[in-house]
Amino acid sequence: MTRIASHRGGTLEFGDSTFAGFAATAAMAVDEVEFDLHPSADGRIFVHHDATLDRTTDRSGAIADLNAAAVRAAIVDHAGSGFRHPLYVEELCAIFADSPVAFRCEIKPGQHGQPYAGFVPAVVAVLAEHQRLTTTTFSSFLLDTMRDIAAATDRPALWLVSPAVLTQLGARGVIDLARLRGIAEIGVHIDCADAGMKMMAEENGLAFGCWAAHTASQIGKALDLGVKVFTTDRPSLAVAIRDRVRAEETSL
């Protein structure tokens, strides 16, 4: 059964990486919540998509260059009410403490595209401390980070393949590289996915998923392909479409 992951807590419904979005996701009939992590200069771990505060808050600067108090002072720019500051990863764990929704944790690079030194073990440690590691799948676009994840934990990890990399290497090249690196799952942009690529991946022992399925047609495509999991900025829409498809299949 294809799994639904609420991307950044449902960005198009609740804002980007917001308390409101994560709280709503925790109560939804989705399978996973996707989120991104960055470290502050003093070692706190924040749930935030970008390496900088510039795009989604009223502050600017790279998270890794700021202390936790400065990051925490930022106001996340969205239309909702309630708590509107960047979340510590510990707070995300608390939001989902009583939820069956699993974690899909993307390890992000810094603002210049390089991995944060020693970051993956710190993330693994805090998730373990808060009893969330056993329900976490990790992901990254960077092969170096995929290596760091494999060294730090035996939890599943998937390689997010950008359209540029897929174009450069081709599906065969991506699959061969994943196997060479010991990667068990890949995820591609939904608009790049097709049944042939999915079949090729699965025939070579790789799980196959998609990201950025935000429209009804993209969500429908992911469900029709039967991918392992897809991320979406519109989790409520994805759940409604999935439920409708299930009802139609049951009535046949």
Image: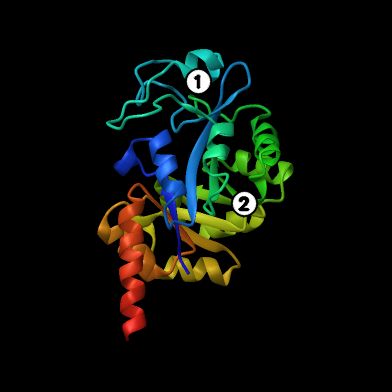
Residue 107 seen:
no
Q: Nearer the viewer, mark 2 or mark 1?
A: 2
Q: CA distance from mark 2 to mark 1?
A: 26 Å
Q: Which residue is identified by label 2?
A: 135
Q: Which residue is mark 1?
A: 63
Tag 2 secondary structure: helix
| Quadrant of the snapshot with the C terminus | bottom left
Horizontal placement of 193 versus 133: left or right? Answer: left
The number of discs equals 2
From the viewer's perspective, is residue 98 above or below residue 3? above
For residue 247, what is the image quadrant?
bottom left
Q: Residue at x 44, y 22 (%)?
A: 52
Q: Position of residue 90 (x, y in %)?
A: 59, 33
Q: Relative to 200, is 243 on the left or the right? A: left
Compared to 173, does 12 lie above or below?
A: above
Could you say where residue 214 lies in the image, as x and y percent from the top left?
31, 51
Q: Earlier in the sequence, mark 2 or mark 1?
A: 1
Please rate how many residues cluster around mark 2, counting C-alpha atoms within 10 Å: few if below 14, some from 14 to 19, many from 20.
Answer: some
Instruction: Confirm whether residue 102 shows in the render.
Output: yes
Q: Residue at the location (33% across, 72% down)?
A: 245
The circle on residue 224 is: none
Amino acid carrying mark 2 in the image: Thr
Question: In the image shown, does 67 or 190 lie closer to the viewer?
Answer: 67
Answer above or below: position of 29 versus 67: below
Q: Secondary structure at mark 1?
A: helix
Query: Which percent across, then down, holds residue 183?
Result: 63, 54
Q: Quadrant of residue 184?
A: bottom right
Amino acid type at circle 1 is Ile
The extreme bottom residue here reads: 252
Front-most of residues 141 and 85:
85
Q: How is the image coloured?
A: rainbow
